[in-house]
Amino acid sequence: MATLPPLISYTPVLIPLNTPNNTPARSTTLLRRDLFDARFQVLNQDEEAAEGQEEGEDKNKGKGRETFVDEGTDLVKGVYEGGLKTWECSLDLVDCLDGFGFGEGKDEIVRGKSVLELGCGTALPSCSVFARLLAEIRRSPSDPSQPPPKTTKLHLQDYNNQVLSLITLPNLLLTYAQHLTIPPPSSVASEADEDPIPTPTFTDPGELDVTPSFLESFDTLLKTENIQLVFSEGDWSGMKVAEGEEYDLVLTSETIYSVPSLPSLLDLLEASCKKETRCLVACKRIYFGVGGGELEFRRRVEERGAEVETVWGEGDGKGKSTGVGRVVMSVKWAGEGKVEKKE
């Protein structure tokens, strides 16, 4: 957090939610840091580092593997795996999570749970779960004078450290500002008022003031509510799950496109799950030119004796009429029975 700028520029992301027939359309809004703002931060940091270097020192030292921030590409093999971009299937996963009860006003409880998102990037699925947690806290905050509640853990992993610091953490802070510190939008005025008091609607881009008091309030929330935020960088093959550490919810989206990386991803997914874990994998049905996709993932999972079930995408009309079809799969790594989606 020490590297954050005083202002974070953001754009709202409107995500349509699955709606039963004959009911009003529903959606949710999450705030995402603007990529140009992250690039501007990197530029400033590079200039400050150059000014602080001693005369004669190599000014390009240490910058090699992080130059992807300024390149107009989605992937750089062995360097960058697309974490700065919000991919379509991550939005599908937000909708799917709402269907499983993680949306605002839903019945799934996040408090006291342990959540892992692999290949998180902009981390909008985790931000939606964090928003659900903040809604629970807003309704029933913990008493600081009492023993702390059971630990709630959000573990976010990405290939690049710079993605985690420039995009992932700021998006969590934006979620915190949106759902806990900023008053909810309202157009209702008291009868004594001539005009309603304007309140944020989060439909337009804006800026978040990252003041010391704001960061202190965020830190206080984590301590009071016993929330652990864990960030991991690097390749999946180098990430180990501690013995006895298992997660209640494991998420990943747009991560199965590369066939060579599937074994390490599957190893990590399997090691992170227990019998009751809900493991959700969002993907396109096929990734042209790289060989990965739904069928290859299913085949490899079933070879390990696990069960795969499509829980989002079939019959919903999403990703079907144009472009490549998209699905969210639920994987049961242990035990029997299928996952039942809540209506």
Image (cartoon, rainbow, N blue to C red):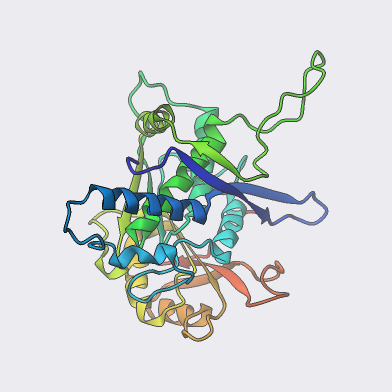
Which residue shows up at 41% across the image and 69% down it?
81
Q: From what the image shows, is residue 142 above or below residue 103?
A: above
Q: Which quadrant holds the N terminus?
A: top left
Total numbered labels: 0
In this image, 27 relative to 23: left or right? left
Which residue shows up at 35% across the image and 57% down it?
162
In this image, 25 relative to 210: left or right? right
Q: Which is nearer the eye, 113 or 293? A: 293
From the top left corner, tell me how far across and down residue 256 is, in percent: 45, 74
Instruction: Judge whether residue 340 can be spotted in this image.
Output: no
Picture quadrant of residue 39: bottom left
Which residue shows up at 55% across the image and 40% down it?
207
Q: From what the image shows, is residue 179 above or below residue 70?
A: above
From the top left corner, tell me how far across and down residue 321 is, in percent: 73, 75
From the top left corner, tell me how far across and down residue 193 is, in percent: 79, 16
Which residue shows up at 43% across the image and 26% down it?
142
Q: From what the image shows, is residue 194 above or below residue 306?
A: above
Q: Which quadrant holds the C terminus?
A: bottom right
From the top left corner, tell me how far across and down residue 126 is, in percent: 48, 51
Q: Which is nearer the eye, 167 or 148? A: 167
Which residue is most to the top? 192
Instruction: Judge whether residue 143 can be spotted in this image.
Output: yes
In this image, 245 relative to 312: left or right? left
